[in-house]
Image (cartoon, rainbow, N blue to C red):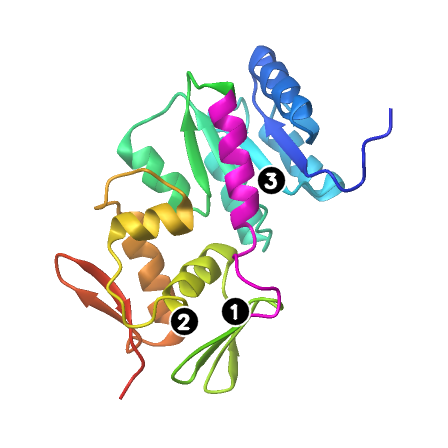
């Protein structure tokens, strides 16, 4: 049967067939097109051949682990959203997954409906909200939502999708001090510790690319985007 062309395509990667089947059935029931893989190498082939809009990726795979799959994709410039799905639930694993460029992290055992909701949320976040022609400006910084471009003082700056979403959220709240919890919830969709270093990691990425004078730390409270005097 032909899949509708406009349905989101999701790649499900897990070495346990019962997990693959469970997630595939649930996603198809909710209207997604699904392809599956049992190994890291197979997942990389599917990404290149099938161009999924999102990847549900187990970490403990028999060849390349999920972190390495993510690392290789990001190293190739592939920014397909990734939801890690794993039995490994230590804080260090969570931070590693998000810092490598993952978009969410779901631990086993999991509720299928909750996973489907996470998939929808990450796909919604794959493009920042707002009107299609929205143009955000703060000082000499300009973010074009429609074309996914960022310019500072007229010079284009290349950002990853996560960096772009984080910057867009700051740009929509100029001068306002945003807590780590607010950033995690609104950029990553994560209900996680406000002290998670993934926030500081991405703040440092933006400072490195945009300069250290735009995003200011309010010690013990959060961060604010304020233009240079």
The residue positioned farthest toward the front in the image shown: 131
> Which dot marks residue 171?
none
Q: Which of marks 3 and 2 is in front?
A: 3
- Is the C terminus in the top left, top right, bottom left or bottom right quadrant? bottom left
**Is 82 a magenta residue?**
no
Do labels 1 and 2 touch, CB within 8 Å? yes
Residue 65 percent coordinates (x, y): 49, 30
Residue 169 percent coordinates (x, y): 40, 61
Q: What element carries label 2?
A: helix
Residue 81 appears in the figure? no
Between discs 1 and 2, the one toward the N terminus: 1
Question: Quadrant location of residue 92?
Answer: top left
Bin the neighbour count of mark 1 within 10 Å (Cα to Cα): few under 14, some 14-19, many 20 and up. Answer: some
Q: Nearer the viewer, residue 121 or 162?
A: 121
Q: Which of 225 and 40 is in front in this view?
A: 225
- Is the N terminus in the top left, top right, bottom left or bottom right quadrant? top right
Residue at 29% x, 29% y is 90
Residue 193 percent coordinates (x, y): 24, 40
Bin the neighbour count of mark 3 within 10 Å (Cα to Cα): few under 14, some 14-19, many 20 and up. Answer: many
Cα separation between marks 1 and 2 = 8 Å
Q: What stretch is highlighted in magenta?
A: 113-134
**Disc 1 target residue:** 158
Cα separation between marks 3 and 2 = 26 Å
Establish if 189 lies above or below 229.
above
**Disc 2 target residue:** 209
Do labels 3 and 1 touch, CB within 8 Å? no
**Disc 3 target residue:** 54
Do labels 3 and 2 touch, CB within 8 Å? no
Residue at 29% x, 84% y is 228
Residue 26 percent coordinates (x, y): 61, 20
Q: Is residue 229 left or right of residue 156?
A: left
Residue at 58% x, 31% y is 40
């Amino acid at each position: 049967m032909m899949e509708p062309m406009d349905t989101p395509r999701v790649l499900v990667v897990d070495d346990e067939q019962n997990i693959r089947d469970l997630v595939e059935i649930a996603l198809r029931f909710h209207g997604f097109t699904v392809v599956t893989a049992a190994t890291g190498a197979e997942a990389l082939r599917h990404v290149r051949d099938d161009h999924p809009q999102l990847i549900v990726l187990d970490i403990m795979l028999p060849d390349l682990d999920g972190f390495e799959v993510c690392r290789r994709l990001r190293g190739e410039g592939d920014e397909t959203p990734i939801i890690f799905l794993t039995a490994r639930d230590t804080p260090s694993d969570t931070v590693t997954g998000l810092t490598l460029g993952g978009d969410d992290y779901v631990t086993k055992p999991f509720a299928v409906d909750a996973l489907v909701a996470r998939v929808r949320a990450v796909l919604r976040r794959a493009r920042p909200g707002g009107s299609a022609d929205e143009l955000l400006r703060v000082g000499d910084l300009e973010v074009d939502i429609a074309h996914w471009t960022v310019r500072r003082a007229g010079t284009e700056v290349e950002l990853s999708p996560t960096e772009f979403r984080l910057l867009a959220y700051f740009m929509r709240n100029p001068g306002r001090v945003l807590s780590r919890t607010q950033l995690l919830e609104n950029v990553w969709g994560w209900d996680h510790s406000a002290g998670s270093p993934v926030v500081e990691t991405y703040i440092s990425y933006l400072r490195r690319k945009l300069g250290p004078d735009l995003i200011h730390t309010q010690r013990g409270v959060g961060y604010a985007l304020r233009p240079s005097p």
